[in-house]
Amino acid sequence: MENLLDSVILIDHLNSIEPATEYLAGLVPERQAISVVTRAEILVGVSDEESGIVKALLDQYSILSIDRETADLAAELRKIHGWKLPDAFQAALCVQHGLKLVTRNTKDFVPGKHNFVVVPYII
């Protein structure tokens, strides 16, 4: 695996934001992951009619769960950086699995400050 896709990237794609769709099209899905946090964040905003299509999109990526070690690391990162808990979970998963976090959340994840962050496009 190479990347952990943040919710905002997939939400942009679902909202027909062309740079997101182009970025995702250039990836090998089998080498990408999402977290259980991302899956939940996306599915909560999807209608019943769209849920099948959206779940099919999400199912093409590996899914990373949160265990005790991830939770402990997320708590430590939250204390250090002041991140919201979902962001701390994303960061912890990246650190644990040696992944890049693909996001456009530059408010919390400054690319020059956090070497695991990739911002593929700006809108």
Image (cartoon, rainbow, N blue to C red):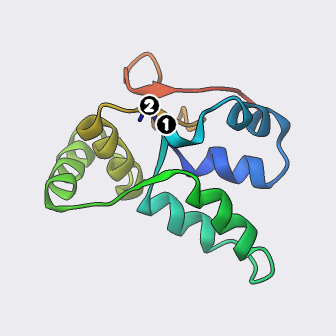
Observer-nearest residue: 59 or 70?
Answer: 59
**CA–CA distance in space, label 2 to label 1:** 6 Å
- Name the N-terminal-most of marks 2 and 1: 2
Quadrant (top left, top right, bottom left, bottom right) of the N terminus: top left
Q: Which residue is mark 1?
A: 31
Q: For the residue labelled by badge 1, is the local secondary structure a helix, a strand or a loop?
A: helix
Q: Residue furthest bottom?
A: 48
Q: Residue at x 15, y 61 (%)?
A: 68
Amino acid type assigned to the residue bearing label 1 in the image: Arg
Query: Does residue 71 appear left or right of residue 94 in this picture?
Result: left
- Whether residue 33 sits left or right of residue 52 in the image: it is left
In the depicted structure, whether residue 35 falls above or below residue 116? below
Element on which disc 2 rests: loop
> Image quarter for residue 72?
bottom left
Picture coordinates of residue 54, whole percent (x, y): 70, 65
Q: Residue at x 58, y 53 (%)?
A: 60
Residue placed under numbered mark 2 in the picture: 2
Residue drawn where x is 18% and y is 47% of the image: 73
Q: For residue 66, which quarter of the picture?
A: bottom left
Contact? badges 2 and 1 (CB < 8 Å): yes
Check disc 2: other Cα within 10 Å, few if <14, some if 14-19, many if 20+.
some
Mark 2: which amino acid?
Answer: Glu
